[in-house]
Amino acid sequence: NAGVTQTPKFQVLKTGQSMTLQCAQDMNHEYMSWYRQDPGMGLRLIHYSVGAGITDQGEVPNGYNVSRSTTEDFPLRLLSAAPSQTSVYFCASSTREGQPQHFGDGTRLSIL
Amino acid sequence: SQQGEEDPQALSIQEGENATMNCSYKTSINNLQWYRQNSGRGLVHLILIRSNEREKHSGRLRVTLDTSKKSSSLLITASRAADTASYFCATDNNNDMRFGAGTRLTVKP
């Protein structure tokens, strides 16, 4: 099992560009989530999904979109990148909400 | 806003000593989880304690939960250099998952 796979590992964008961060899990987990980690602030929940076709907003959803067309994949889209979105983004999955989460190794995103 | 807040922010100890990290939170919870993060890597789940539990053990880890004080502690006994990492508490309340800013633990050989 690969667990949770995030791509790309690093990305540099210009302000106003859009991009999609990919996340895939091979554990047949129902629950998937996206976090951002900023220095000194811990992780903050952006969006989550309790199953295919169902998504909901977390603590900091503005500027991001998600979709969950399959159980395995949960992409995060930045609509128009802003310097404030420079961060490390983590995707995680678990059997269901509230259960221990498995994390990917993150995408380090810089927006100039 | 953050829910869990860890204390201390940083902790440096010698190999073999015990390390205690504390977490305080603000609202009611379903469970509280502790995670570990090595530099440049994703978080790894350590232990989950439910709101109706007071103490839980896993190997060298001991977690306590006091819901009346809205606090939890993580004790790592007989620490090793490999325990050097950041440790985060996370509270779950009906899909509202909140992480603290973490405690940076350094274990010197």
Image (tube, grey):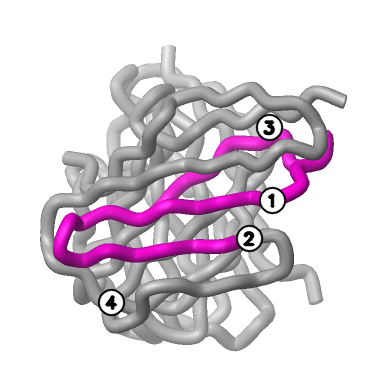
- Residue labelled with disc 2: B61
Question: Is B50 left or right of A88, judged from the image as shown?
Answer: left
**Crowding at mark 1 (Cα within 10 Å: few <14, some 14-19, many 20+):** some
Q: What stretch is highlighted in magenta?
A: B62-89
Q: Do the residues labelled 3 and 1 touch (CB within 8 Å)?
A: no
Say which residue appears at 47% left-offset and 42% top-offset: B21
Q: Residue furthest right?
A: B109
The chain ID associated with circle 2 is B
Q: Earlier in the sequence, mark 2 or mark 3?
A: 3
Establish whether labels 1 and 4 are both on one chain: yes
Q: Can residue A18 be seen in this view?
A: no
Q: Which of marks 3 and 1 is nearer the N terminus?
A: 3
- Residue labelled with disc 4: B51
Question: Is A100 left or right of B32, judged from the image as shown?
Answer: right
Question: Is A59 left or right of A43, judged from the image as shown?
Answer: left
| A47 to B104, vertically: above or below | below
Q: Are marks 2 and 1 in contact (CB under 8 Å)?
A: yes
Residue A75: image x %, image y %? Answer: 46, 60
Give the foreground label among 4 and 3.
Answer: 4
Residue A21: image x %, image y %? Answer: 51, 48
Residues under labels 2 and 3: Cα distance?
20 Å
Residues under labels 3 and 1: Cα distance?
22 Å
Residue B39: which numbered mark, if any? 3
**Crowding at mark 2 (Cα within 10 Å: few <14, some 14-19, many 20+):** some
Give the foreground label among 2 and 1.
Answer: 1
